[in-house]
Amino acid sequence: MRTAPLLALGALITLAGCGDDPGSTAAGGPVAVSASDTACDVSRTEVAAGTITFTVTNKGSKVTEFYVYASGDRVMGEVENIAPGLSRELRVELPAGTYQTACKPGMTGKGLRGAFTVTGSAQPLTADAALAAAADSYQRYVRSQTTALLEKTQEFVDAVKAGDVPKAKALFPVARTYWERIEPVAEIFGDLDPKIDGREEVIEEGMEFTGFHRLEKDLWVTGDISKSGPMADRLMADIREIVAKANAEKLSPLSLANGAKELLDEVATGKITGEEDRYSHTDLWDFAANVEGSKAAIAALRPVLEQRAPELVSTLDAAFTTVDTTLGKHRAGDGWRLHNELSQAELKELSDAINALAEPVSQVAAVVSR
Amino acid sequence: MGRAAKREPAMTVSRRGLLGAGLAGAATGAGVWALQRDPVSPAIADAAAAVPFYGAHQAGITTAAQDRLHFVAFDVVTRERSKLVELLKDWTAAAARLTAGHDAGPIGAVRGFPEAPPDDTGEAIELPPSALTLTVGFGPTLFRDADGRDRFGIADRRPPALADLPHFPGDAIEDAISGGDLCVQACANDPQVAVHAVRNLARIGFGTVSVRYSQLGFGRTSSTSQAQATPRNLMGFKDGTSNLKAEDTAALREHLWARADDGPSWMDGGTYLVIRKIRMLVETWDRTPLAEQEAIIGRDKGRGAPLGKADEFDLPDFALRGPSGDPVIGEAAHVRLAHPDTNDGARLLRRGYNFVDGSDGLGRLAAGLFFIAYQRDPRRQFVPVQRNLARSDVLNEYIRHVSSGLFAVPPGVQDAAGFWGETLFSRGQ
């Protein structure tokens, strides 16, 4: 039920919406970005550190995206799917440093890049002690998951290389669990995510179908993994790279909140439908891992939420419990029933539970960033 | 800011007021369009205007039938009565805003905190109220589930008139698109406004209700006001000529509105809704000779006059015989079987819509009529009429009833302090 928290939240949002909202945007107001099919004009390319608002207007004829990259093409913030004629806002918390802005007309390629400098040391959002603690806490969670991810992926890779199909099949959903729990963190690192977790239909032209799902297809469709060794090695190398990056990443509280929501969106769009693990049908492992990851991010933010929106916390608790109970019906041994064993009614029940949870989770970011 | 904005708290704005000028044009355009459709009706002259939400009866029943429908049925997924009641209150508040042409939530589609998802989905920004009405109904399963369990402590309040519909000969009912614990009928003159309303109500309901099925309809097949011209269904015939109309208040009292002494007092001023999704096999119908089509319906296709008569609104003469001695309107003609004279005077307020759900994979239009009828007691009205039709109607060769639903439609919400179903859920009633 979203009424109670909404009312509480609504009152505060209303105040923020009516009055000035100091501190939410760096001095000088929003940075205007005029995106066309051939240009990406940024009104100011040097601003003071803090939460910076970009107002991106698509003046071109193609759907575009706007990114802010740190060095190494690390995505600091992005706004996708801006239709011609529309404006969208991106709010991103940027410490002092050098960045690149990019518009991607047609949503492909490296984009139209420009340099962007952030000066000084404006108070980041994490200055609030509770928020800082939240970020640290989640950081520790990520490290715990990446450690397990390295181990389990290695076991999976070893089984593939040893030609042990049953063992590899058994390890596939287990290794993925650690991946799925922290997937929004992994998604920060641009092109590594599709290499590790890309599904066959999303692979762009000129790019090879690699990663978990390539090996899944080998294991379940052809059953022949005699030539899968190099592919398994590549997966391991990509996992090592992303783990090193994820461990070094300093996450903002806002990214935790958005990550918690994105994990549930992953469930709603990919796992409920059985698209994610279409060969193995082990989608419920991913489903459970996404929910666990979402819960971990919310848990890290809990002290902040309890201070600022206690009613939202009880709504979230109840909704997480409903999801756990509903999903729990499909336990099978140490794992889960296969997606194709569930009836339409059972899938709808899961879908309802996720929707009921994702609505209040989508309110968390505003509470955190207020 | 639009005139409607003044009625609401300061932070709520009308969708049209929000973005300023430019919008007057849209409203004017819609008004002109409406005038072309229905030149004589002051009630519907402005298809863009708002229909009042509060009143003794719910809107969307005798309201001049709008051109578009989005009907939705929900299953209640909570077991807690308090959550259900809370949802009905939230829905009522949202419905009052939406029908006035405002955003679904108190903040709106584009005025909220940037990090928060908006409390309105936004696709109706700049669109006028478009005569949107939202009408709620309670299905039999809300009172007692399939296992006979009294789910919300209201089983003893189930009206006798809300008796499960019987199986009719030829029924091909699909469970997944039938029934429902709750329903909302959204009607508007702009399909986007109707869809926007249903989408936002469904969103507000996540965790308490789950959408069971929904249906879009694109052309009204009945008129509910004498000021409206009689429209045509997808068989090409005028439909609803002898419908109950808003102006006939005596007939509405007799045939439409439930009274306190009909059953439980909470339904006083309410009515009962039957929905049937009727698939039409239009391809075979279209290759039927004109004379046969007219004989099946019992009316002239062009003007809509009963066979043997000249004008649409002439009363049919079922005793009239042709030169051969056979009845001019056949014994199994649709108009005869459905007529009050054949059914102990039973009349319905029909409010159906044409639908086309694309095609059916066999190259045929998935088309038909989404039948909607309101009445005082389905046991004395819809059921005997449909029994008659299902048994004998020659039209059955060209139609299939594929869904069915029955709902108790509670009385209207009197003012902003009330809510949908208040008379049902308030203690001491």
Image: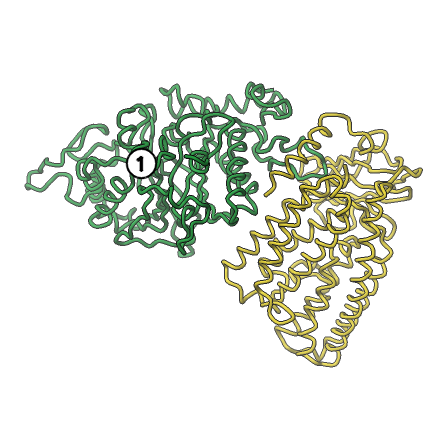
Chain colours: A yellow, B green
Residue nearest the observer in this picture, B336 or A306: A306
Q: Is residue A300 above or below residue B334?
A: below
Question: Taking B8 as reference, is A146 left or right?
Answer: right
**Residue B187 appears in the figure:** yes
Q: Dot 1 corresponds to which residue?
A: B375
In which quadrant is the C terminus of chain A drawn? Answer: top right
Report the chain holding disc 1.
B
Residue B218, located in which quarter of the rendered image? Answer: top left
Q: Position of residue B193 (x, y in %)?
A: 51, 33
In which quadrant is the N terminus of chain A drawn? Answer: top right
Residue nearest the observer in this picture, B389 or A79: B389
Residue in view at x 69 percent, y 40 percent:
A82
Q: Is residue B251 above or below residue A140?
A: above
- Considering every residue shown, the one lying at the far front of the view is B428
Residue nearest the observer in this picture, B280 or A126: A126
Question: Taking B55 as reference, is A312 left or right?
Answer: right
Q: Position of residue B149 (x, y in %)?
A: 42, 53
Judging from the image, what secondary structure is the residue with disc 1 in? strand
- Considering every residue shown, the one lying at the far right of the view is A120
Q: Position of residue A73 (x, y in %)?
A: 83, 51
Residue A338, located in which quarter of the rendered image? Answer: bottom right
Within 10 Å of disc 1 (Cα), the crowding (few <14, some 14-19, many 20+) is: many
Residue in view at x 65 percent, y 39 percent:
A5
Residue A16, located in which quarter of the rendered image? Answer: top right
**Residue A112 appears in the figure:** no
Q: Amino acid at mark 1?
A: Gln
Q: Position of residue B4 (x, y in %)?
A: 55, 21
Residue nearest the observer in this picture, A106 or B168: B168
